[in-house]
Amino acid sequence: MDGNGRWANARGLPRTAGHRAGVERVREAVRTAVEAGIGYLTLFAFSSENWSRPQQEVSDLMGLLRFFIRRDLAELHRENVRIRVIGCRQTIQPDIRALLNEAEDRTRDNTGITLVIAFNYGARDELVRAVRGIAEAVRAGDMDVAAIDEAAIAARIDTAGIPDPDLVIRTSGEQRLSNFLLWQAAYTEFVFMPCLWPDFDRAAFLDALAEYGRRDRRYGAVSAPDLAVGS
Ligand code: IPE
Ligand code: MG
């Protein structure tokens, strides 16, 4: 969800106003994902690198997460949304940790879309934590080195049990991954959109999905028509 700051700047507003407008788009994004039959929607809300922003902005973003969970949790739960949180839970304020835990616990048995909130998330940090966990399991004698395979790693990263993303959409015209789902995005399609996150409405989301629909996914193989030509 990128471009909140520029959206606010363009209107002569403080960056916080952009973040606030961005939060309002989240509900719509969840609804559009449900409408489109998407099973998992991951929102990159706060990265492990975002702590380097001015202290006031960091605290505004924390405040907005509190606001979002407190205001929207009951409704998301009513709509059968299951919430999962990825990212490092150790280094965030205790009250935020409690809110995130509550959101997961309350919606655990829901069977609708899974809303994955990436908060204090960084893919390299996630991999470091997973590698440490594996090293500890080996040292404790609970795991053989030979048992370290792709499945074992996938089971120890934050997204354990969540399928790899088919599509990553990045708004605001930036064309980079910024430490998002590095392991999981091995075969992901990317759609980069110029629109700023507070302008990312239902129509923009559907446009991105239509673009995804035009992609030919081969996973390292050759597509069927090309095989026919070569044979
Ligand atoms: C939102 O957009 C991303 C968050 C960290 C919440 P930005 O704050 O990155 O907005 P720009 O990139 O400055 O426009
Ligand atoms: Mg940005």
Image (cartoon, helix red, strand yellow):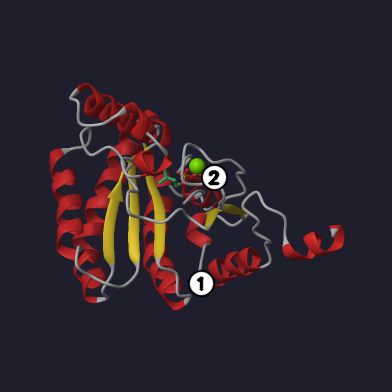
Residue 78 in percent (x, y) is at 22, 76
| In-front residue for pair 40/12 | 40
- Mark 2 CB near ligand 2 (8 Å cut): no
The label number, if any, that marks residue 151 in the structure image: none
Tell me the crowding category of disc 1: few under 14, some 14 to 19, or many 20 or more residues within 10 angstroms, Cα based. some
Residue drawn at x 21%, y 64% is: 73
Residue 131 lies, with reference to residue 180, above or below; the image says: above
Horizontally, residue 37 falls left or right of residue 205, namely left
Considering the numbered disc 1 on the image, is that residue within a helix, a strand or a loop? helix
Horizontally, residue 228 falls left or right of residue 11, namely right
Could you say which quadrant of the image residue 96 lies in? top left
**Which one is earlier in the sequence, the residue at label 1 or at label 2?**
2
Q: Which residue is mark 2?
A: 186
Q: Residue furthest top?
A: 139
Which one is in front in this view, the residue at disc 1 or the one at disc 2?
Answer: 2
Distance CA(mark 1)–CA(mark 2) = 27 Å
Could you say which quadrant of the image residue 203 lies in? bottom right
Tell me the crowding category of disc 2: few under 14, some 14 to 19, or many 20 or more residues within 10 angstroms, Cα based. few
Q: Which residue is mark 1?
A: 202
Horizontally, residue 182 falls left or right of residue 17, namely right
Considering the numbered disc 2 on the image, is that residue within a helix, a strand or a loop? loop
Quadrant, the C terminus: bottom right
Residue drawn at x 51%, y 46% is: 185
Total labels: the figure holds: 2
Residue 42 in percent (x, y) is at 40, 56
| In-front residue for pair 67/169 | 169
Residue drawn at x 40%, y 54% is: 43
The amino acid type, in three-letter code, at marker 1 is Arg
